Amino acid sequence: MRRRKLPLRRLRLRERSRRAAPQAPLSSSAHPIVTKQASVDLADWQNVTAKPKDEIVIVSVGELGPWGSGRTRTQAELGIHPDGTVDLSAGAVLELAWNMGLLTWADSPKPGWYDTDGNLVPEEDIAERYHDEVVARSGIRPFEEGMGDDYKDGADEEEAEVFLDHDVTFSVPTRDVAAEYVKLDEAHTTIAPDEESGEWNVTRHAGSMIRVPRRATMTRTVGGQFPKGFDPTRWGIPASMVGDVDKIALWNIVTTVDAYLAPASPRPKSSSPSTPRWWLRPRALASAA
């Protein structure tokens, strides 16, 4: 069989085109979930009379729960198995590990992710090294510390109703305050001025009901909590605010910042953790929906 020889020039062109041909993208488990824009039929909007400036457009949502952000929570829900194991992408493991303080980015001495001992961790090793730990720190787990510290040892504080078997007297600064105790239980409460101190004495008589705190045994010892180690200061919240502002309010600020970052807002200041503080007080932001 006779084979036809191609001219040298055509061989070179064929080799050049083969090199220039687009290669299939390398598969990566870092971000397996690819979002797509929903199809829109413009005909459905022809009868809209509202002006665009008067409409509210939701472009992103911030979320924080037992599995971290909405991104990591989605992967956990889709990746959990009946035996309790959870499949997470490399990106989800890295996000959780960073929020938990297990990894920190540094530009020197060499740009990369460093562990708590200051050692550089190769990115290709992060998923395997930290997967089991971030899973153990997330989701429904025993009440031990953090959010679950109030329920430690399987008990919670509650108030029990008891009835006095003798009179009990205590002092309050003014008559108005003393009168408030009378309103609560007029049948068992009397008040009188204390001439020496200038205060007022309130007496609860025998038979009066009072509430006494106690540690009550709980029927459940596990529950959904924020992942162990999550710290709002990693998102730029000043350390001075952590002790002065309610924790839920702080995390509400974080989720707001996350919502700004997710759609890649073209306004640089919108991506700064401090931006919401310029426009809203933390107390007002904490009640935002």
Image (cartoon, rainbow, N blue to C red):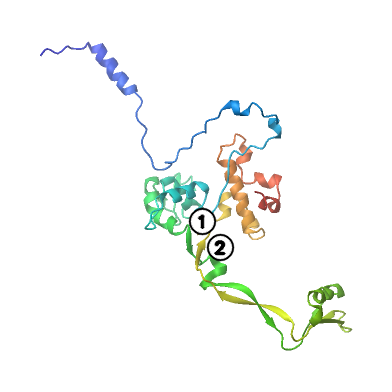
Above/below status of 254 relative to 193:
above
| Residue 166 visible from this viewpoint | yes
Q: Residue at the far bottom: name it.
A: 166
Alpha-carbon neighbours of circle 1 within 10 Å: few (<14), some, or many (≥20)?
some
The answer to whether marks 1 and 2 mark residues whose Cβ atoms lie closer than 8 Å is no
Q: CA distance from mark 1 to mark 2?
A: 11 Å
* Residue positioned 66% across, 37% down in the render: 56
* Residue positioned 57% across, 75% down in the render: 216
Q: Which residue is mark 2?
A: 147
Image spot of residue 259 (x, y percent): 58, 43
Q: Which residue is mark 1?
A: 66
Could you tell whether 123 is left or right of 279 in the image?
left
Above/below status of 194 relative to 138:
below
Closest to the observer, 6 or 191? 191
Examine the image and state in which quarter residue 279 appears: top right
**Earlier-in-chain disc, 1 versus 2:** 1
Name the amino acid type tagged 2. Answer: Met
Image spot of residue 28 (x, y percent): 38, 40
Q: Residue at the far left: name it.
A: 1
Image spot of residue 265 (x, y percent): 59, 36
Name the amino acid type tagged 1. Answer: Pro
Where disc 2 sits, the SS reads: helix
Could you tell whether 165 is left or right of 40 in the image?
right
